[in-house]
Every structure is written in structure tokens, then in C-alpha cells.
Image (cartoon, grey):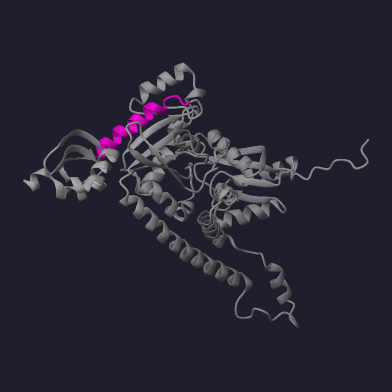
Amino acid sequence: MARFPFVSTTPAPERAVLVGIERHDDTWPLERSLDELCRLAETAGAQEVARITQRLDRPSPRTLIGSGKVVELCSLVRRVDADVVIFDDELSPSQQSNLERAVGEPVKIIDRTALILDIFGLHARTREGRLQVQLAQLQYLLPRLRGMWSHLAKEQTRGGIGSRFGQGESQLEVDRRLIRNRISALRRELRDLEKRRCVQSKSRVASPALRVALAGYTNAGKSTLLNKLTGSRVLAQDKLFATLDPTTRAYKLPGGRVITITDTVGFIQKLPHGLVEAFKSTLSEVREADVILTVVDASDDDFPRHIEAVEHVLREIDAHEIPTIIVFNKVDLCSCDELGRLELRYRDACFVSSVTGYGIDALCEQIASKATALDEAIDVLIPFQEGALRTLIHEQGTVMAETFEEDGYHLVARVPKRIASPLRRFDVHSVE
């Protein structure tokens, strides 16, 4: 027997009870939504020990769930020795407060929004990402700030020495004012960072390279696809929201055309509006793209709802009119029959495996085809001293015909719009 017994220092996962309500107009099955909530909880370091559901036509304004279900929840929490109760729907500040009083300390009551914010806080790596998460967290906390200094209020009711502090302003008001000031400071700092991002974005806009953005439901394999295409080593994990900060890599299509591919934060159903607002500068990478690759997990039974959730966020950030290619990833996890049905249903989509490389060449061909469709036709005579422009046309466009004239290079080609305008001065018809 060892003299000093081994004692694990790994913190035990929190024991979570999941709560969901079912409405007649829900687009997602309740069990599917709670399964996703369970994965979110696991990502945050919690373990589901029980779940409780209720069908309601109209949620209770006091506690979201009915009073009888609250009693059942309290009993369940004590029986399974839970540490936290997680609601699948967003709780109002008053509902959260009422539930906390009913369940009692030290059990925490949180909702899906707070859980997602917590995960974002764990995974944010860059300064901008951390600031965006902190801003969203403070905006969520502000209306819920209460009761943290109630012990001081009790002391003041006694009167006498030490009871007259804060006569002009309560501690709760001070805390709210401090949070509002911090929110204003974070917004200013994020605006400064956004200005720098705009400068970088303008340099990319000035670049003739086609901009491709990867968008999709969280854990659809966007980072793995980026690594497969570009040979990079971006973090790719089987976790929800493993990637928060955008990553851009250059890639040369088979025809020699150079494009940029940007990996972005994953989307999810019921994505908190505050997060969309806080991450707008990051999501601008999607909004400013020439082509969006909507990456879908083909092995997930809920992929149609995932596509709907992605389209909803794209509309929210005004990116829904950008040309899109649907890319079904992880087809190596599908059977031949499942893959066949997908190919029949989504004839214009691409079907790939970021792990095995299946379908990657076909995806590149479709990106090149989409890029060509976005190009403009030119018929130009480039002077010999402007040879760099001829090289640019060959690298970024599709040359249909080229002859060597007495005054320069005569090219008929299709090129990106960004370089078509500067080349108009060499247009053959204007020269004639």
C-alpha cells in the first residue's frame, strides 16, 4: 500500500439538470434541442444527470414552467444532488430570480444563453474575441444584477455608526453604473479594433483574390475542411464552438487562380442576439465574402434544421444574397444509400470528406466555376511596358484568347470585378 494515497486534483464535472418546454409552434423537436443542450453543457464542463420537460401553450411569466413543475424540479434537484439547472429557453431576470428562490442555494439557475456565453468565454483566444465575449456577458448580466450587496442594506437598517455609507446611491446602482461604463469602454475599444480590421479588409478588397468564407453550424467540420484545402494547422476539435476567431489562408485553385478562404465562428439554433451583435465585426468576414461555403454535417440527422439556422443568421447579418455553395462534409460517416439520397435531393451541392479527401477536387472545380460566373468579360490591349497587368490577368482570370500585336498584348478574358474596372482604360474599343 502506498504511503501517500493518490488524490485526484481534477475538478469533478458539475451535475446538471436540463429543463425544456415544448410549444405547438416549435420547429425543433424538444428532445433534439435538449440533446444539443446536453452537448453544450458537456463542452462547458458539466454532466447531465437528469432532464425535465413540460408541454405549454404559453410559458409562465413567473417561472417559465408551471408551478407544479417547479415543485417537481425542486424535488428532482435534491434527489440527484444537482449543482446547476440549465433551461433550454432564455429566462427573464425575474423568472431566474423566482426559480433561484424556489430551488434554493447553492444550486445555480442558468439558461441556454448564459451557457453559450460561458463556452465562448472558455474558447476566446484573441484580444478581440475576449472583448466581444466580455461585452456580450456584461450586456446579459446588467438586467440580472441584484441582491449581491443585500447584507449591506441589512446593516444600514440598524442605524448608528457604519450605517450611513451610500446615502446618495445604493451599491446596486453603483454596480450598474460601473457595468454600463465598462460596456461603453468595451464598445470604444472594439470600434478601434474594427477600424483596424476595416483597413485590413480594404487591403483584401483591393486584392484581386476571390474571397471565400466558410459558414455553417457549429462542429460541422469547417476548420478541418480549411486544413484539408490549404494544408494549414488551424485548431480543429470535436467540440461545439472550438473556433471563435476568424482565420484566413490563401489557396491556389487547380487552374492557378489564387483565392482566400476564411474560417469563421459556428452558428447554432437560438444563437443569442447579443452574441450576434458583439461578433458583428468578426461576422463581417462572412458579409464581405464573394462566395460563402455553407458547410453541413452530412452525418447529422438534423442537418435540414442546421441549414435553416445558418440561413437565419446570414439574413441577420445581411449576407443572404451572397452566392452560396452548400458543402456536405463528413460523408465518410454516411452509408452509400444515405449519400445517394443526399445527392438526389441536393443536386447543386458538393459532397466531401475533410478526413479522407473525398470530393475535394469537385469542390475546388465548383468554386472555380462560381468565381468565373462572377467575373466580367474584357477585351483589352495591354502595352508591353505593363506586363505585370498581363500576368495579373493570367493569375486571376480565365484567358479565352491572346495574341501579340504591334502595340502590346491583346487579351480576351474574364476577370474579377475588382480588376476589371482598372483595365477598362485598355479596352480595345476605346483604343480604336
| Residue in front for this viewpoint, 357 or 208 | 208
Q: Residue at x 50, y 34 (%)?
A: 29
Residue placed furthest toward the bottom: 161
**Percent position of residue 399, x then y:** 22, 35
Say left or right for 380 vs 69.
Answer: left
400 on left or right of 358? left
Quarter of the image holding residue 311? top left
Against 117, residue 297 (above or below) is above
- For the residue pair 57 and 386, the one nearer the viewer reads as 386
Q: Which residues are magenta?
A: 357-375
Name the main secondary structure of what is drawn in magenta: helix
> Of 244 and 101, which appears nearest the observer?
244
Left or right, 56 with respect to 52, comes to left
Q: Residue furthest top?
A: 337
Q: Considering depth in this image, is 50 or 191 the residue closer to the camera? A: 191
Q: Is residue 370 magenta?
A: yes
Image coordinates for residue 354, horizontal then vertical, percent: 48, 30
- In the rendered image, residue 420, in percent from the top left (x then y), is placed at 21, 46
Q: Quadrant of the N terminus?
A: top right
What is the residue that sits farthest to the left in this orientation? 432
Image location of residue 233, percent across then percent down? 53, 39
Total numbered labels placed on residues in the image: 0
Q: Residue at x 37, y 36 (%)?
A: 252
- Which residue is located at x 57 percent, y 37 percent? 237
